[in-house]
Amino acid sequence: MSSSQIDNLISMLNQIETNNNYKKTDEETAMIVANHVKKFWARSMKANITKYADSDGSQLSPAIKLALAQL
Amino acid sequence: MINYYDPATNTTSNKPIDFNKDYGTPASTSTQTVCLEIDGVKITVAAGTSVMRAAAIADINIPKLCATDNIEAFGSCRLCAVQIEGMRGYPTSCTTSVKEGMVVSTENNDIAKLRRNIMELYISDHPLDCLTCSSNGDCELQDMAGAVGLREVRYGFDGDNHLDAKIDDSNPYFTFEPSKCITCSRCVRACEEVQGTFALTIEGRGFASKVSAGTSENDFASSDCVSCGACVQACPTATLMEKSVIDKGQPEHSIITTCAYCGVGCSFKAEMKGEEVIRMVPYKGGKANQGHSCVKGRFAFGYATHKDRVTEPMVRDSIDEEWRVVGWDEALEFAANKIKNIQAKYGRESVGGITSSRCTNEETYLVQKLIRAAFGNNNTDTCARVCHSPTGYGLKATIGESAGTQTFDSVMKSDVVMVIGANPTDAHPVFASQLRKRLRQGAELIVVDPRTIDLLNTAHISANHHLPLKPGTNVAMINAIAHVVMSEGLEDKNFIEQRTDEYNAWREFILDEINSPEAMESITTVNAEQVRIAARAFAKAKNGAIYYGLGVTEHSQGSTMVMGIANLALATGNIGREGVGINPLRGQNNVQGSCDMGSFPQELPGYQHVSDDVLRAKFEKSWGVTLDNEPGFRIPNMFDAAIEGTFKAMYVQGEDILQSDPNTQHVQAALSSLECLIVQDIFLNETALYAHVFLPGSSFLEKDGTFTNAERRINRVRKVMKPLAEFADWEVTQKLSNALGYPMNYQHPSEIMDEIASLVPTFSMVSYKKLDEQGSIQWPCNEEFPDGSPIMHVESFPIGKGRFAITPYLASEDRANKRFPLLLTTGRILSQYNVGAQTRRTANNTWHQEDLLEIHPNDAEERGINDGDWLGISSRAGDTVLKAKVSERMQSGVVFTTFHHPISGANVITTNSSDWATNCPEYKVTAVQVEKVTSPSAWQTRYKKFSAQQKEHFKRSPKKQKATIGS
């Protein structure tokens, strides 16, 4: 997975987070993000982002990290 | 006992309407009935019906010339004069309403003499060239001369007359031959009442009066005429006549079918000579269009038989090679082997496909079935990804169903109509005509759009509000409107209490001062007081309806905006009855259908999620395969994976992704990375330039099936000619599936619909038989709603209660800055359709030969730009060159273009920015710079070269093609 592809997935996750975190705790946001990803993302996209989260994850927010842990 | 038929006791109020008959005046909507007697026949009709119509219902056909049943009675020709007991003289039956107990005589010696005299005067100033006249066989004047028994013209033909009046053939599709005009005003009234353009008028008085398009300086082409053809249809003589009829003569049979252009889904009679379409005439029985059409549907059908149609399959191993023309079996074998080899080498998920929103429901269903069952993955998507996918997401989340809530006809009961990010006069013209009719009756209009769209210029409109917001600030605007509703106590408390959930959290959110129009003013740039006035008008209306288009969805917050719209409708109680509702104006003819049919990667047909074991099991049982329980790739994900090297083959039916998807250079890179691209289309489109297999498609005229329009109306598409390439698209998909080893053996599309009905709960009672009986069906159509559902959510929502969604505004990432100070937004114009593959191959090019960049006079002046200058437009994604059109329709800081011509490269500029929930591209906001240039862009030069090279590959293919590539 090239870095530009990972960047793309990260920016998609950031968008999902910022559109769903109004007055929510990280845990609440994480659940929404996780459900969205489960429902709409293809298997390989989930695998790639999880791999990134496990290996580096520096560009992921706390809520997104929590979300990915739920996948 | 023998029952004799007695006409005198024949009551007629319940007789079904014959949509092929002209009843002379429009139907009355009254529920009261009136009994009267016409020529000894007792007739019961709705109060308010004209005597003419009442007679016609009883098959008593009173002669008429100036009357026709899609416009109001006018009473000018007086040919329909009758005698009525107790009334003096000869009242005209078209302008006289029925009354209880009325006794009417339609024929006697006095009436006959009167009618003959009238006809004699008409004919004294009319050419006597009936035998060679284009309307011979379809001329009401000729029919009436026959009906009244005209035998002589005592006045002679030597007096002053109009026989030398000059023909106007400036319109590419019809001629205006004033020497044949009887000045009945039907054309003028059709232009006003049916189309709502008011382009035609009667100029002069008495003998000098004549029909005129615009002023006396204008011909039809230079007038305001939008070439909808309503006047041609209304004309009782050969004065306004289709050129195709002049060239070829009168059609001999007709077949009712559905237009393949926009999401209005107009019904047409395809009027034929053998297998040749002579003209398309909108069908009065079509519930979406009620006998009206636009320039595309009525006239722009010539593409179907254009010389560019590719009618033989072709294959090649690499896009650097010439095409080889092969037989169907070889092409399908070639394609199937490639797919199988790629899957063997790169894995099951390395292939996918795109279903077509241009094709029928049945064809779309088969393509996604092939992908899920034969490819064995869920990598299916459709062009709704790039238009209305946020509608699907946003409406499902809030009101539980991914579809508009109303019929088009519902607008006739609306008191305030809010149009957001849509340009119906150009993109949904027939609905726009109906909306304008309602606006002329007094409904208020609110337009939320950066541009001054034509709807705002509707003639005889009582009140309109324009909220010209900055592109990318929709959510800020809808929140501000809802804030006004809530903070001023204008909400519908009853509705909220009984029909909605999650209200308190939303109420708290929306009442936050950050959502007030005053706080949002700096973001939207719209004056707060203007927003308050419009919001109050909407909230206080008895019936408030919202119509929206791609100006809502094609944003990074597209889904949020759809939910914001739903919030507003829920808060004001504008759902669940006529005159209200949330109405997405769908772009393509079958984009609603392609979504319904399971084109999205996460949903099986009927929006049934792939991860739901129970739902999936139903499909597995029917299809006899195990289905993947994980969503597949969306179109942009496919492109990303292709560039990454893990996605290697695509089957694309009827969609030109290269031209229509954003960031063209990214798409080019993705398509170039594929080892097998299978394109099925009627033309060698731009995407096909990158293809390895070309499977000839069939136009809507060549197949049976159904389209579903924006009001969930399933309309029949009927085959009027044989497929030019032998097979309809559904047959080709079936053959490809068989070649891949997954058997499909449908004999007719009706069998596919039966399968759909067995698997999709909202379609369970849909069948071709029912469609033929009812004409059309609006889904849901099942045990709960056996005749379909014109208005949805009357009692409850599919999710029980409507759900308010929290919709905070977030700025688009692609903001204007110093380097890219302007915002580009893209859209469509009336005469061309989307990528233009069809309309560019018709005379519609007369109106739009190239895409232009519209720019506000201030921005133009700052850059020294004049009309017609070449402009370089650059964004983060790329640059292109277009000609300038300085336009007051734009607001300062915003530029606009269309993407109807491939060489324009409009999508070279648009970026990968997309909706957070659905990846719908943000076509409507791209930060750009514009400057004068002298040569085409580097992309355009490269593209021209590539396109020319591909033309050579096509022309020089070993078996010489009859066709040539057009572009």
Image (cartoon, rainbow, N blue to C red):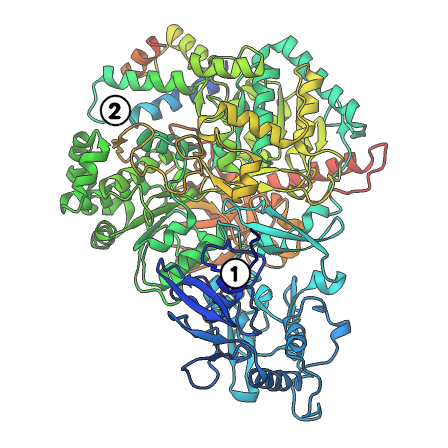
Where disc 1 sits, the SS reads: loop
Residue B883, horizontal then vertical, whole percent: 55, 54
| Residue B599 visible in the picture | no
Q: Amino acid at mark 2?
A: Asn
- Which residue is painted at 28% across and 25% down in the image? A20
Tally the marks. Answer: 2
* Placement of B389 over or under B584, stated as above or below: above
Q: Label 2: which residue?
A: A21
Going by the image, does B838 lie left or right of B7? Answer: right
Q: Label 1: which residue?
A: B867
Residue B241, horizontal then vertical, whole percent: 65, 67
C-alpha separation, residue under disc 2 versus residue under disc 1: 47 Å
Going by the image, does B295 lie left or right of A24? Answer: right
| Residue B508 visible in the picture | yes
- Which residue is painted at 67% across and 24% down in the image? B734
Nearer-the-camera pick, B235 or B315:
B235
Q: Amino acid at mark 1?
A: Asp
Nearer-the-camera pick, B517 or B56:
B56
Residue B772, horizontal then vertical, whole percent: 57, 41
Q: Residues within 10 Å of mark 2 (few under 14, many from 20)?
A: some
Where disc 2 sits, the SS reads: loop
Going by the image, does B699 lie left or right of B823? Answer: right
Pick the quarter of the image with the C terminus of chain B. Answer: top right
Nearer-the-camera pick, B237 or A70:
B237
Q: Chain of mark 1?
A: B
* Placement of B541 over or under B561, stated as above or below: below
What's the mark number on residue B821? Answer: none
Q: Are marks 2 and 1 in contact (CB under 8 Å)?
A: no
- Which residue is painted at 48% across and 25% down in the image? B760
Q: Chain of mark 2?
A: A
* Placement of B556 over or under B112, stated as above or below: above
